[in-house]
Amino acid sequence: MALKSALNMNGDKLTYWVQKLTTFARPSSVDKQEYVSLKKRGATVVPADMTTINEDMIEAMRDADVVICTAILDTFSATPMNNFATAARKAGVKRFVPSLFGPCAPGRDVTWLREIVSKP
């Protein structure tokens, strides 16, 4: 277990304990500098195809307390995140934090269609 610290967006120092950090990356991205840097700092980088649910992904999540999904939905499909959540459930993960809670909706003044639909 290692004591880590970081600054939040307000510049306040946050301190937290990290026992083990595993990150998943597309197989084509594993050798990118960002992942190489994480490996140097002790993280485990696992190549994962999030278009399917596979045993390697489930096994890598097996002893995790929390899985935080930060997948970017470039095709507006929630399938990769859903596959990740399903793998986390099958691995026995206690808490899953999705990257997508729902569509972003602009304020009432922004879209004329929403204003028309909302009128009594």
Image (spheres, rainbow, N blue to C red):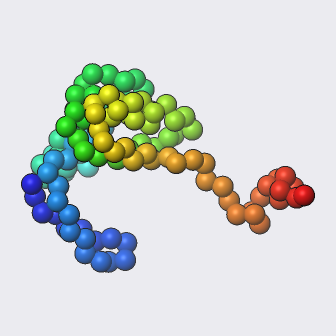
Q: Which residue is situated farthest in the left direction here?
A: 1
- The answer to whether 32 is drawn above or below residue 92 in the figure is below
Give the quadrant of residue 93. top left
Quarter of the C terminus within the rendering: bottom right
In the image shown, does 99 or 119 lie closer to the viewer? 119
Number of marks present in the image shown:
0
For this view, does 32 lie left or right of residue 39?
Answer: right
Residue at the extreme right of the image, as rendered: 120
Left or right: where 101 falls relative to 3: right
Q: Position of residue 97 (x, y in %)?
A: 39, 47
**Residue 95 in sight from this viewpoint:** yes
Along the line of sight, which residue is nearer the eye, 75 or 32? 75
Q: Residue at x 14, y 51 (%)?
A: 19
Residue visible at 61% across and 53% down in the picture: 104
- Where is residue 18 drawn, in percent x and y? 17, 55
- The image quarter containing residue 114 is bottom right
Quadrant into which the N terminus falls: bottom left
How far from the left and from the top, in percent, is residue 42?
12, 49
For residue 47, say whether it is visible.
no
**Residue 34 location (% of width, % of height):** 26, 49
Q: Is residue 92 found left or right of 18 in the rendered image?
A: right
